[in-house]
Amino acid sequence: MTGKLMLETALKLIGDRIQDYKKIHDWKITRLEDWAGNDEIPAVCMAVVAEISEAYEAFRKNDIDNFKEELADVIIRIIGLCHGMGINLATEIFKKMDKNDTRPYKNGGKRV
């Protein structure tokens, strides 16, 4: 089994679990059709940003356990979004990594 296939399988299992959890709690499952609207997808994107902010705050407070939990929340939100929209996240990750392999390294002259 290739790395991509293993990742696809894992993401599908996680995505199914996230979707089941949303159904149990009667929460919105973001779909590809939501792309035409102006609120659902931006709301989920901002929820990802909020989780990143919470991870940053955990770092600032030197709380490694909460930091790890918040990073998991980021991934859960992203996998849930992709799963509901039918985006094959494994394919997109590998495509982006392949693209990155062909690009010159640059960081805009910034230190970090």
Image (cartoon, grey):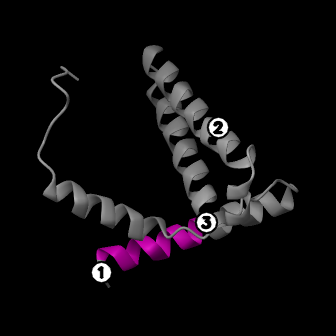
| Cβ atoms at labels 2 and 1 below 8 Å apart | no
Closest to the observer, 21 or 27: 27
The residue to which callout 3 is attached is 83
Q: Mark 1 or mark 3, which is nearer the start of the sequence?
A: 1
Crowd class of label 2 (few under 14; some 14 to 19; many from 20; radius 10 Å): some
Residue 8: in magenta span:
yes
Q: Amino acid at mark 2?
A: Ala
Rendering quarter of residue 85? bottom right
Q: Quadrant of the N terminus?
A: bottom left
Q: Amino acid at mark 3?
A: His
- What span is colored magenta in the figure? 3-14
The residue to which callout 1 is attached is 2
Question: Looking at the image, which residue sits at the far top?
Answer: 61
Label 3 element class: helix
Distance from Cα at disc 2 to Cα at disc 1: 32 Å
Q: Which mark is residue 47?
A: 2
Please indicate whether residue 36 sits to the left or right of residue 46 in the image.
right
